Image: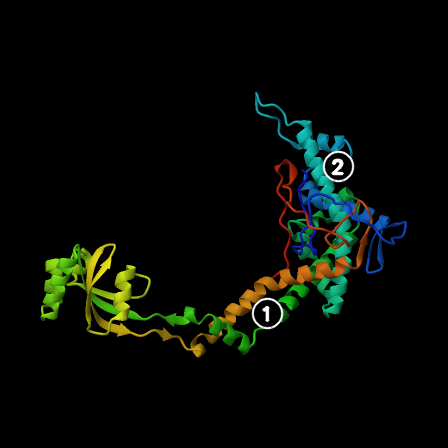
Amino acid sequence: MLRHARPTLAACAVGIPTALLLSGCGGLSADSVASVDGKDITKAQYDQSFKFATFQVNGPTALQGKNPKLIVPTPPDFKSCIAAIRAQMPKPAKGEPPVADATLKTQCKSGYDQMKQIAFESPIVQIVVAKEAEDNDVKVTDAELKKGWDAYLAQPNVLGGKQNLAKYKSVAGLTEEPLRAQQKTDALLQKLNAKIVKDRAKVSDKDVEAYYEKNKAQYTTPETRGLHIVLTKTEAKAQAAKRELDGGAKFADVAKKYSEDQVSKNAGGKLSGVTKGQQERGLEQAAFAAKKDEIVGPVKTESGYYVVRVDTITPAKVTPFAQVKELLKQRLVADKQSTAWTDWQEEITKKWRKKTECRDGYTSTFCKGYKEPTTPAPAPGGQQQAPAQQPAQ
């Protein structure tokens, strides 16, 4: 069964559109489909890449069974592809109609477009990655590639195991060379990723201090006040309550006699740990404007009339920079790490877009004049794209 797969900066998260856009060509030789910084990608290279892309889109599961065979969509009618997919499908349930040829044709067309896209994109990506690795002094030795060969082949989206290598050669009609080229590109990307993230995630003490000063409110414990309150329905009752308090009556007795707020009334009128933004606006303004032990009111609010006494004032406290420095540094490093690789990829794509000429009928995000599609179309036939392998973080 055809599956969706796509190359990225070797699975690098550079988006590839699902539909091919036409891109102009400049001074390309007659035998070239693209030129990357003066290095031609010939039609013969593209044809070989297309064979490998056909295997990639079919997927390693195509190697299973007694007589494995790749589905090769052939435009414009895709008849052989439609027949091959239908042969793999279970028979419809009794009373259910078979899947229409038009639906299968859409799936075949989607698979073909992906093969063509991958076939064109992969050689460009390999050139770009090799050059960027060289510029960043990143190397992968033959010994490293040899040591990691079996593990590479074992990846589910590569071969699913070294035991499938002979079948791959037979069914795909290819040598190990495309696999080894892809392995090297992936390995270079792994090392590039590690270097780029490390280099771009450096944070100085000045960076940390500047962040602290800008966000100091996050590291400040706000002022709190302990109160006693009485809430009444009428201003007259509030005035009566205040007179008794001014005369020396106990707050608990006055609250029990007059207050409508059951919670504070049960606590003798006590309301502890009040910070700004928690209470009604009028009560809050009065409470934070009053002095310690001062009785204020009546204060009119939507709930009624308050009489308030401030019992305690705990000033706001700023956590010293020294106490949060390391935590902030870790946060800033993590933030930079999360964007470093994506930012680098965007920069590299724009950089190489200026150096890459593409023939009409072929396109890549690296092609000169490439424009991002405004609204990416969903994959036809309800197919889901296989997730691209990402470089290790």
Q: From this viewpoint, which residue is outermost toward the top?
A: 95
The disc at residue 201 is 1
The N terminus, quarter of image: top right
In the shown orientation, is residue 260 left or right of residue 115? left
Point out the tag, 2 or 1, that comes first from the N-terminus: 2
Name which residue lies at 44% across and 77% down: 321
Percent from the top left, x then y, of residue 287? Answer: 25, 67
Q: Which three-letter amino acid code belongs to the residue tagged 1?
A: Ala
Can you tell which quarter of the image residue 149 is in?
bottom right
Q: Is residue 372 above or below residue 99?
A: below
In the shown orientation, is residue 316 left or right of residue 33? left
Q: Nearer the viewer, residue 59 or 3?
A: 3
Whole-number angstrom distance, CA of label 2 to CA of label 1: 45 Å
In the shown orientation, is residue 325 left or right of residue 115? left
| Residue 72 visible, this orientation | yes
In the shown orientation, is residue 69 left or right of residue 95? right
Name which residue lies at 58% across and 65% down: 337
Q: Nearer the viewer, residue 66 or 256?
A: 256
Mark 2 neighbour density, 10 Å: few (under 14) some (14–19) many (20 or more): many
